Amino acid sequence: MHAQTRARRAGAALAAVLTWAALLAGAAGCTPQGADGTLGKPRSSEEAIRVSPDDGSRAVRPGKGLKVWVPAGRLESVRAVRSQDAREFPVAGRIGRDGTTWRPDDPELALAAKYTVDVVALDGRGRRAARHVTFTTYVPDKRFIGYVMPENRSTVGTGMIVSLEFNRKVGNRAAVERAVRVTSVPKVEIAPHWFGDDRLDFRPRSYWKPGTKVTVALRLRDVEAAPGVYGLQHRTLSFTVGRSQTSVVDAAAHTMEVRRGGELLATVPITAGAPASTTYNGKMVVTEMLEVTRMNGATVGFRRPDGKGEYDIPDVPHAMRLTSSGTFLHGNYWARGVFGTANVSHGCVGLRDVKGGGSATPAGWFFDRSLIGDVVEVVNSNDRKVAPDNGLGGWNMPWKAWKSGSAVK
């Protein structure tokens, strides 16, 4: 059975200027005294302290970079702040060994941001000067984001694959791939694989160990995925791997063996795809769990001559999605006498249930013990192996082939 398709505050930090002003003169109206005890007219702050981009610049491109320097003397302090998305972020940087230049740790300016730079320096005669500079950066017309699976702070099965689907086509895959980092505790090797130009998945060589903590860091902001298309996200999410549960559906024997921690938990009678609409073989991952859903054959190509679906069931209970093309493992209350004996579905795996869904039925029992990220493997079906990009089918790809799908060589 198959289912219907789913679905800065800008501001300048000026407080420190008052403190710095007290350093510039001992009393109002006085001419600053040099470190050598002489009096003289100091150079203007613009002459003594240089900042690029210039004060008041607009639509500065990312590659322009930020630089502070003095033609003579030395820098005492540089404070830079980026205002973006209604928040302020300090810009980390450092003064060079000779004390004449300051550069940010990240040479690239952020897009759609306002920068405020406050500098205090001594000129070549030891006279103190200060500058306050603001500028804004280019705001691109197009942005891209990645929709991430699984959800933040979720607990998932050991077969979970981290999957990002992008809202725009990615031309510069290497740049986008470098901006996404997936790590785990305990540490294991995790590799990326591209499926087309809008999907990037990550997985380890074998299933995660129970209790593993996985962190996904998205540093996509200002990354250029295609000409004129820049990333929007700068966030970190995480999830935890729960207990180990894997299930093997034998389409020929009409059974499903459910194992928890490697030990057999139960053998459940099932019905799989009929000869004309067989179930895919291979490892599939639960990506969605629905207490009840509507399933209409017309949405996945099972139509009658009049164009209507071969079936239209408004209340399919205990439905767990296995592929993006519409394969589910779900409760079935309308077929009788077939569980454990015959395959009659349109490609899904059916478990006995009652209308409305029952907790004591095989379907209810399995649903209550399942997690998104659990693996369900189908064997002995007269069909091909599920494609690696159909749902989270990446476990069907050998590790070497999976790693070859990285854009970063």
Image (cartoon, grey):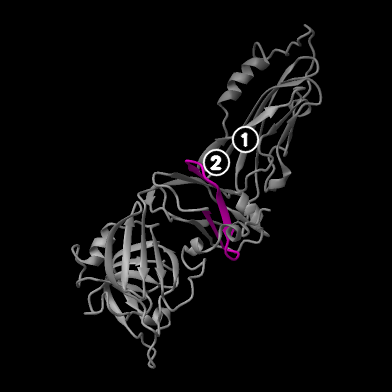
Question: Which callout, 1 or 2, points at the residue further toward the start of the chain?
Answer: 2
Are circles 1 and 2 on residues that touch, CB within 8 Å? Answer: no
Q: Residues within 10 Å of mark 2 (few under 14, many from 20)?
A: some
Residue that lies at the very extreme toward the top in this rendered image? 37
In the picture provided, is 341 more to the left or to the right than 179? left
Callout 1: helix, strand or loop? strand
Question: Which residue is located at x 27 percent, y 76 percent?
Answer: 314
Residue 173, image x and y in percent? 64, 57
The residue that disc 1 covers is 116
Front-most of residues 299 and 398: 398
Picture quadrant where residue 230 is located: bottom right
Residue 188, image x and y in percent? 52, 45
For residue 58, above or below residue 368: above
Query: Within the magenta stretch, is there residue 329?
Result: no
Q: Residues within 10 Å of mark 1 (few under 14, many from 20)?
A: many
Magenta stretch: give its range.
Answer: 182-203
Question: Which residue is located at x 51 percent, y 40 percent?
Answer: 87
For residue 359, above or below residue 219: below
Front-most of residues 235 and 137: 235
Disc 1 residue type (three-letter): Thr
Residue 279, image x and y in percent? 40, 75
Q: Main secondary structure of the magenta part?
A: strand
Disc 2 residue type (three-letter): Ala
Query: Within the magenta stretch, is there residue 189?
Result: yes
The residue that disc 2 covers is 10
| Gap in angstroms between the C-alphas marked 1 and 2 | 10 Å
Numbered label tally: 2
Front-most of residues 92 and 174: 174
In the picture provided, is 49 more to the left or to the right than 363? right
Q: Quadrant of the N terminus?
A: bottom left
Callout 2: helix, strand or loop? loop
Residue 68, image x and y in percent? 73, 31
